[in-house]
Image: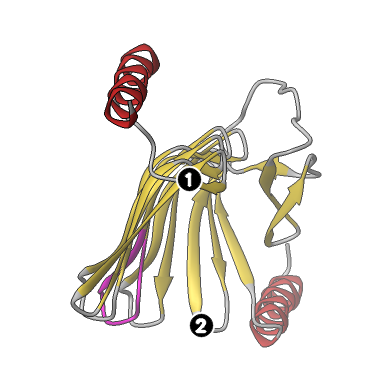
Amino acid sequence: MSKLNKRISLLVMVLTLIVNLAMGQYSTKDFLTHKVIVNHDDYTVVAYVRPTNKIYVESDRLYYWFSTNLIKSTQGGYSGKLLNGRYQEFFLNKSMKEWGAFSAGLKTGKWKSWDEAGKLKEEYYWDSGKKNGIYSKYDSVGKVAEKGKYRNDLLNGKQTVFIGDSTQITYFKKGKVIEKPHFMPKFIRNIFSKNSLKNTVSQIQ
């Protein structure tokens, strides 16, 4: 290759880089580790697109995938390389913004997010693209502001919200608010209920 051709090739590469940066996003990829780096205006993403086996796509799941220098998400489908492996987001000051992992395009395991000052904001557990397990939300000083539990992507069980010095407790079942559940077996509750009715009748007599 002549010196002129080399210079032209180098110029084309520089111009391509400048154009992508001007658009606010630029991606580089490490072909050996399948690492993808995508730069946004205010944060940077480091993710992995390791090869996956052919998967059955679930219509109720949100799939994350990489294509044309972008990370995209689509419910019930994808058109590119699925995110597969560790996932990280960084603020421009290099502090952590979000941390988690993907398995064949779906969020999995523990996910955490922080504000720009490094204070923890949220913590969730995911299983095959759905929230499953305990979660916590934190206030601006890093104290727990809300905690509870998800099952199959729906709030389930006791949820506690801390407002100043007060505590608000709500109970959920499959995403719907319910009365405080009874932890005593039903047959025992029935016995007490019958005894209470007998006592009431005897007092009336």
Query: 41 or 170, which is in the foreground?
Result: 170
Does residue 176 belong to the magenta stretch? no
Residue 96 image point, x, y percent = 33, 68
What amino acid is found at the position of numbered circle 2 in the picture? Asp
Q: Can residue 136 be spotted in the picture?
A: no
- Mark sitting on residue 42: 2
Query: 59 or 87, which is in the foreground?
Result: 59
Q: Which residue is mark 1?
A: 172
Q: Give above or below for 69 relative to 81.
A: below
Residue 13 image point, x, y percent = 69, 73
**Residue at horizontal 40%, vertical 70%?**
90
> In the figure, is residue 74 to the left or right of 32?
right
What amino acid is found at the position of numbered circle 1 in the picture? Phe
User: What span is in magenta?
Assistant: 113-122
- Tell which residue pokes out farthest to the bottom in this image: 22
- Mark sitting on residue 133: none
> In the figure, is residue 34 to the left or right of 168?
right
Disc 2, SS: loop
Does residue 114 belong to the magenta stretch? yes
Residue 98 image point, x, y percent = 41, 62
**Residue at horizontal 23%, vertical 80%?**
164
Disc 2 versus disc 1: distance between alpha carbons? 37 Å
**Residue at horizontal 72%, vertical 76%?**
16
> In the figure, is residue 159 to the left or right of 7?
left
Query: 57 or 24, which is in the foreground?
Result: 57
Residue 38 placement: quadrant:
bottom right
